[in-house]
Image (tube, rainbow, N blue to C red):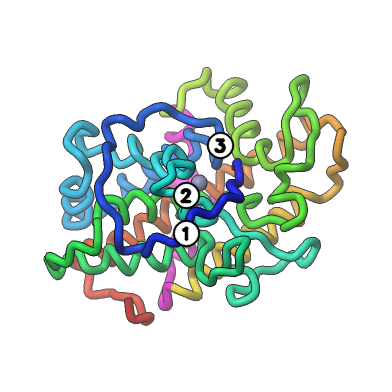
């Protein structure tokens, strides 16, 4: 996660316009890895009910042929564009060093103190925007396609534990170390290294095989009893807060713990953290589907929080 400190002025969340999706396919090495976002979105899209699935397909540009995951990394690719610089603080939450807790009113702001400008605030905001889809509103302040892509991306980010990290080390970005033989940092270990090592070592670099394993774990495996609690949500704001609390808790217990700058992380760290990371990807996907089914589907089940 490359943090941009330059703040170009607030563009209101609603004042977004569809902008050149076709020209933005060059990936950048930042944020929850491309693979992490792709898996979160694939898991979610497979769990959509028919009406929400149709709405998602309607909102996507034609050239992705209905595949949400093809654009889930888009918010990382445009975050340094002048027009979108205001979104750069929406990918993460900085919490006080060693507090190991998340408090929305204390922590959800950008580096200038602007409230709601963090990943938890962004999920609320874009969910709220999407909830107008079924009203068929012609309100041009809202761009539903961008809202869908931002929501889908940020649901991945909030589940990456080091995206809810300590302030001084920028969520582990400044904790330089080695991942096996190459240089990395603690944030990147959780963004990409664990996942890419797992893909290379166990799945012949085939994302589909890894995805099958993850989906197997929650449909008929070790997480099958947990899925209903993952997707349970009465009040959206408190659910989002819970996802952030889970992340900082994992960041403290499994991310930072026992890690010293300059050290080499290898098999022990990889083997113990990989299952945690896979579970977070699964949770992100299941919960993204839950939100999309509620705001875009015909489910009577809404959120208690007015959107
Ligand atoms: Zn991101």
Using the image, determine if residue 105 lies above or below residue 111.
below
Predominant secondary structure in magenta?
Answer: helix
Instruction: Say which mark, if any, is on residue 9.
Output: 1
Lower sequence index among marks 1 and 3:
1
Q: Could you give the CA–CA distance between mark 2 and mark 3, rounded to whole angstroms?
A: 15 Å
Along the line of sight, the residue nearer the viewer: 110 or 123 = 110
Q: Which residue is mark 2?
A: 85
Q: Nearer the viewer, mark 2 or mark 3?
A: 2
Q: Which residue is mark 3?
A: 30
Question: Helix or strand or loop: what does disc 2 sit on?
Answer: helix
Q: Residue at x 69, y 50 (%)?
A: 171
Q: Residue at x 65, y 69 (%)?
A: 102
Q: Nearer the viewer, mark 1 or mark 3?
A: 1
**In the image, is residue 226 part of the stretch drawn in magenta?**
yes
Query: Considering the image in quadrants, where does the N terminus appear?
Result: top right
Using the image, determine if residue 290 lies above or below residue 59.
below
Residue 158 in view in this figure: no
Q: Are marks 1 and 2 in contact (CB under 8 Å)?
A: no
Using the image, determine if residue 176 lies above or below residue 181.
below
Question: Helix or strand or loop: what does disc 3 sit on?
Answer: loop
Judge left or right: residue 198 versus residue 61.
right
Q: Residue at x 56, y 48 (%)?
A: 279
* The image quarter in which residue 71 lies: top left
Q: Nearer the viewer, mark 1 or mark 2?
A: 1
Query: Considering the image in quadrants, where does the C terminus appear?
Result: bottom left
Q: Could you give the CA–CA distance between mark 1 and mark 3, rounded to whole angstroms?
A: 22 Å
Question: Helix or strand or loop: what does disc 1 sit on?
Answer: loop
**In the image, is residue 62 part of the stretch drawn in magenta?**
no
């Amino acid at each position: 996660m490359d943090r941009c400190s330059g703040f170009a002025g607030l563009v209101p969340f609603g004042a977004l316009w569809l902008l050149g999706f076709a020209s933005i396919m060059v990936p950048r090495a930042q944020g929850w890895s491309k693979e992490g976002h792709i898996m979160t979105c694939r898991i979610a899209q497979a769990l959509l009910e028919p009406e929400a699935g149709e709405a998602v397909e309607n909102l996507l540009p034609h050239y992705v042929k209905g595949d949400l995951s093809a654009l889930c990394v888009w918010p990382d690719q445009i975050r340094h564009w002048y027009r979108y610089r205001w979104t750069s603080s929406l990918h993460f939450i900085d919490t006080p060093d060693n507090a190991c807790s998340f408090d929305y009113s204390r922590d959800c702001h950008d580096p200038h103190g602007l409230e709601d400008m963090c990943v938890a605030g962004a999920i609320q905001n874009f969910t709220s925007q999407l909830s107008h889809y079924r009203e068929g509103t012609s309100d041009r302040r809202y761009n539903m396609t961008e809202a869908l892509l931002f929501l889908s991306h940020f649901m991945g980010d909030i589940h990456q534990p080091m995206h809810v990290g300590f302030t001084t080390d920028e969520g582990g970005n400044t904790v330089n170390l080695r991942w096996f033989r190459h240089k990395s940092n603690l944030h990147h270990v959780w963004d990409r290294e664990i996942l890419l090592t797992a893909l290379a070592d166990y799945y012949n670099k085939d994302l589909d095989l890894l995805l099958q394993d993850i989906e197997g774990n929650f449909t008929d495996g070790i997480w099958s009893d947990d899925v209903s609690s993952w997707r349970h949500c009465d009040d959206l704001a408190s659910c989002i807060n819970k996802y952030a609390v889970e992340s900082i808790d994992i960041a403290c217990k499994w991310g930072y713990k026992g890690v010293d700058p300059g050290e080499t992380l290898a098999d022990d760290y990889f083997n113990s953290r990989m299952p945690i990371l896979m579970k977070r990807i699964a949770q992100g996907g299941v919960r993204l589907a839950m939100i999309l089914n509620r705001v875009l589907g015909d489910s009577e089940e809404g959120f208690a929080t007015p959107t």
